[in-house]
Structures are given as structure tokens and as C-alpha cells.
């Protein structure tokens, strides 16, 4: 994915009138781990209402909170583990030599494990309240607060291509997309960065949303091309693709990827 210090967030209105936001922040942990500075730019075709943008920001705030917590606890895993292991040994030897019981070792091991687990959880909560964690939350919430949505010729063209494919069977959808005057706007060099990022967001949605069988069909089409995949096209089930990444977005995605095959996902 090409960021070029700018991450694009797309607001798109689908042919049935539903609006979706496509973005990379479901994997925000990776963005935090990568570090560096960046800005987020909102792109839309049909302008979203204020309530929609507010709800989207709240979703991003929640993602930031969870991602910072996960990153902090994972980055402190080794000191947490070593501290817990040392505490286990301390409790184990204390119970072994100071407190006598009729069943040797069993109580000591159980008590040591319980103490180590409690310390591990306690340190995890403690790290989430550190100054580093607070600064990260404030930093990324500030980036979210500064997101400004602007009209995008690329997003407008994408919505129009989706609309032209509405109500058609698979073969007709492909023909409508590839023959659309608006499709040329999608593949133009000036929209290379927006196109690259949107494709990566769609692929992420495909990996999460579609079944293993559907992914195999898409991989086969990408490998062979539309012209040689007539049998594979019949295996695409429009009814089963009704989430954010529906059949219309999948067809546009396949058209954008033609000639630049990359494996979608390992089965």
C-alpha cells in the first residue's frame, strides 16, 4: 500500500443507497508499530451528512483505544513475562519453605501460577495507563480530529461505475464496468495513489468477509482474466455477497486488478 504520508479514507454510497467507509484502521496496531508521521484525508463522491462522519469518527476513536492498548501490552510482553516468572518462583519458594502443607508441590505450583497470572494482568492494566500510552492516544485522536472530507473525482467515478453495474447479471456487470466512460477515470495515472489504497482496503474486506470458496474463484479470475474465466464467473454468487464488499465492488475490483495479478490470500 502506498501512503506517501497520506492515508485516504473513502466514503462511498452503493447502488442500493447504503453508505460505507473503507479505510486501513482495522489494523491500526500495524500503523502504530510502523511509526512515522502521516495525515488522513477523507474522500467522497456523494457528500456524507455530519451525523455519518461523527459516527465514523467515534468508530475510529474506539479502534485507536483498543489498538493502543494492544500495542502497549504486546510491546511490554517480555518484561511482563519475566516479572511474572520471577514472581512465580518467589511465591513457589515462599510456600515451599515458609508454609508447610500436607500435599507438597501441588499447592506451591498452583499458588505460584495464580500469583504470576495476577501480576501479569496487573502489569498489563498498569502499562495501559502509562504516559506513553496516553500520549499515543492523544496523538492519534488528534489525527482523527483533523480528518477533513473533500469531494474526489476518483470516488465520484467509482460510485458511478457501481451504479452502472446495478441490476445486471455477472457478465453484464463486467461489460458495463469495463465499457464505462467513468472507468477510465479510475485507472488514470493521476488517481494512482487513491486507486492503490482503495484496492488494498477492498482486499482486506475480501479476506474478512468472503468464504474460502469465493476467494478461490476470485483468484482464478485474476489469474486467467475475464475472457478465460467464463466457467469461474458462474461460481460467483451475488446473493451471498451482500456486506460492505458486495458483488458490485468485487467486479470493479477485479476489473482494476486485471493485468496486475497478485494472490489474494493463502487458503
Image (cartoon, rainbow, N blue to C red):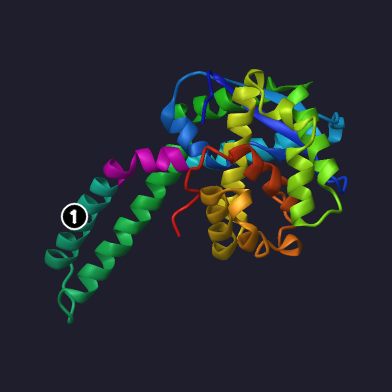
Q: Which residue is mark 1?
A: 90
Residue 38 location, quadrant: top right
State whether residue 33 is above or below residue 166.
above
Q: How many marks?
A: 1
Q: Is 108 positioned to the left or the right of 258 in the image?
A: left
Observer-nearest of 11 and 238: 238
Asked whether 150 falls inside the magenta stretch, the response is no
Residue drawn at (42%, 32%) of the image: 33
Residue 148 position, x and y percent, is: 73, 20
Q: Is 99 positioned to the left or the right of 60 in the image?
A: left
Q: Circle 1 — which element?
A: helix
Observer-nearest of 228 and 27: 228
Dominant SS of magenta comes to helix
Residue 62 position, x and y percent, is: 63, 40
Residue 213 location, quadrant: bottom right
Residue 126 position, x and y percent, is: 43, 40
User: Is residue 20 visible in this depiction of the protein?
Assistant: no
Q: Is 209 positioned to the left or the right of 133 in the image?
A: right
Residue drawn at (77%, 23%) of the image: 153
State whether residue 31 is above or below residue 62.
above
User: Is residue 107 visible in this depiction of the protein?
Assistant: yes
Please state the extent of the stretch shown in magenta in the rendering. 70-80
Residue drawn at (83%, 35%) of the image: 160
Looking at this view, name the residue that lies furthest to the front: 227
Residue 217 position, x and y percent, is: 57, 59
Observer-nearest of 226 and 49: 226
Amino acid at each position: 500500500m502506498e501512503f506517501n504520508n497520506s492515508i485516504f479514507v473513502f466514503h462511498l454510497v452503493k447502488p442500493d443507497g447504503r453508505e460505507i467507509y473503507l479505510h486501513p484502521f482495522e489494523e491500526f496496531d500495524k500503523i502504530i508499530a510502523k511509526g512515522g508521521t502521516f495525515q488522513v484525508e477523507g474522500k467522497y463522491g456523494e457528500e456524507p451528512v455530519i451525523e455519518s462522519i461523527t459516527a465514523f469518527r467515534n468508530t475510529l476513536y474506539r479502534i485507536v483505544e483498543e489498538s493502543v492498548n494492544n500495542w502497549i501490552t504486546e510491546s511490554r510482553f517480555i518484561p511482563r513475562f519475566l516479572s511474572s516468572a520471577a514472581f512465580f518462583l518467589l511465591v513457589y519458594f515462599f510456600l515451599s519453605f515458609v508454609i508447610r502443607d500436607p500435599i507438597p508441590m501441588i499447592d506451591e505450583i498452583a499458588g505460584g501460577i495464580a500469583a504470576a497470572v495476577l501480576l501479569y494482568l496487573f502489569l498489563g492494566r498498569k502499562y495501559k495507563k502509562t504516559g506513553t500510552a496516553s500520549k499515543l492516544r492523544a496523538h492519534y485522536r488528534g489525527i482523527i480530529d483533523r480528518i477533513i472530507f473533500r469531494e474526489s473525482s476518483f470516488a465520484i467515478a467509482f460510485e458511478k461505475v457501481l451504479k452502472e453495474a446495478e441490476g445486471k447479471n455477472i457478465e453484464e456487470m463486467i461489460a458495463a464496468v469495463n465499457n464505462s466512460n467513468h472507468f477510465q477515470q479510475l485507472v488514470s495515472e493521476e488517481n494512482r495513489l487513491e486507486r492503490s489504497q482503495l484496492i488494498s482496503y477492498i482486499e482486506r474486506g475480501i479476506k474478512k468477509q468472503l468464504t474460502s470458496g469465493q476467494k478461490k474463484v476470485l483468484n482464478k479470475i485474476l489469474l486467467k482474466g475475464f475472457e478465460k474465466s467464463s466457467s469461474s464467473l458462474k461460481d460467483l454468487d451475488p446473493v451471498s455477497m451482500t456486506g460492505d464488499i458486495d458483488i458490485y465492488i468485487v467486479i470493479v475490483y477485479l476489473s482494476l486488478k486485471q493485468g496486475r495479478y497478485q494472490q489474494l490470500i493463502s487458503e
